[in-house]
Image: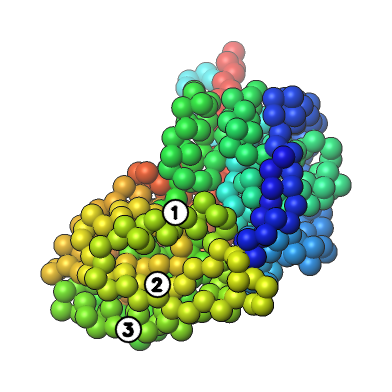
Amino acid sequence: MTDLVDPRTGRIRDSVDPAREDAVRRAVAGARSARPGWSALTPRERARRLERLAGLVEEHAAAYTAAEQAGTGKPAAEAVGEVEQAADLFRFYATAVRAQPAPAAGRLVAGHESWVRWEPVGTVAVIVPWNYPLLMAAWRCAPALAAGNTVVVKPAESTPDSLLLLAAHAAEALGADVLRPLVGDRRTGRLLVEADVDMVAFTGSTAGGTDVAARAGVRRTSLELGGNAPALVLPDAPADTWPELARTCTYNAGQSCAAPARVITLTEHYETAVERLTAAMAERVAGRDFGPLNNADQAARYDAIVTASQAKHDAAGAVEPAPGEEGGFWRPARVLADLPLDDPAVTREVFGPLLTVQHAPTVDAALDLAGGVPQALAASVWTRDLGLGLDLAARLAAGEVWLNCHLVQTAELPHGGRGASGHGTDLSTAALHEYQRPKTVTARLR
């Protein structure tokens, strides 16, 4: 049995039995048996069922919010918003799958007619992390299901609650075994990757993604492996730059792959940047404005990085948990500055409410600093010079770049990484092709 711990208190709240070989085999077999019937449905019928699932999520939003809070410790406002986004994703892909462009067709070879069918990959293993249990499941499952695949989805060990609720509603709306849950630990995830699935969609660490890719072999993978996002702040940045960076860095206690992590400014503006960012982060209070870290291992990892840092400027904000929650995994908003280029707080993805501040003599040197880590998931640029900002956005190595904002996302816009941040596309209609494969059919006319 695995104990489930409330991140807000540090106390055991429940326990689960991790799935092993037989349970994994049954889950995959069930999803495979459901696949022919599900993929044979017309896009209109699949859309109707996905719409029904979206409606069930909305009808039971309070239960989903409570489940998300139990596993993550998120403040209610964050959990409510993420439940709304999850429902919206199922509804978005219900529409998107019906609006795909018609397959290419034509007489491309003399005397022959050719066309392309887009077919579902098959049965997809989906493995999602603990930072956004429901939302990341929706990011992966909604396009996979809309494209005609069945899914076996494994939540993180510490956050199974909302996924089990989603699976129950999926059985009601979509049909039995179209979406199968599999609760367990890392061993469960490895067994699932090695099982009889046609594709693996994984969201997690770079180390985890490397392991998944090795175990998946020649089968298709879609890997979103985290980030260490730079925020390039020029001297003419808008006045609200600092509170916006503080807010987005501490959303979900900084446990967002695309969250700002490394503030980079010009040397002439460095002292001002440190002062203003420190003041803005001091306004963010753990327990009032954002939640705890998710688990004891993550808290220990965060503490180890902070302890190992050689930063000469270390400014930590306040921690004010509610009565009875003092034993949780609370960590303050923190700014580290005056630190070496190879400081662990710079080179490693901290995944907490922490911002480092670095400086460079020129814009080009600042760009070099921004690209000085292996991850390339997201970045932002802050300047009133729109032309310069757009130029820098084009030059930054990242799958998603924001200008004078950060973490602004919607179902219509694609999200994906480069380099050590993995490959593949989440969100937007482009994600449908992650879970489809083309088949060319050519007929001789005479």
- In front here: 18 or 430? 18
> In screen coordinates, is 13 left or right of 416?
right
Say few, some or many: other residues with alpha carbon within 10 Å of mark 3 (under 14 / 14 to 19 / 20 or more): some
Q: Percent position (x, y) of residue 157?
A: 64, 45
Which of discs 1 and 3 lies nearer the camera? The answer is: 1
Mark 3: which amino acid? Answer: Arg
Check residue 334 in the rendering and tell me which mark sits there, or answer none. Answer: 2
Q: Percent position (x, y) of residue 361?
A: 13, 69
Give the quarter of the figure containing the C terminus: top right
**Residue at the extreme left:** 361
Which of discs 3 and 2 lies nearer the camera? The answer is: 2
Residue labelled with disc 1: 301
* Residue positioned 62% across, 28% down in the render: 191
> In screen coordinates, is 297 left or right of 172?
left
Check residue 244 in the rendering and tell me which mark sits there, or answer none. Answer: none
- In front here: 370 or 19? 19
* Residue positioned 21% across, 77% down in the render: 270
Residue labelled with disc 3: 276
State which quadrant residue 113 falls in. Answer: top right
Say few, some or many: other residues with alpha carbon within 10 Å of mark 1 (under 14 / 14 to 19 / 20 or more): some
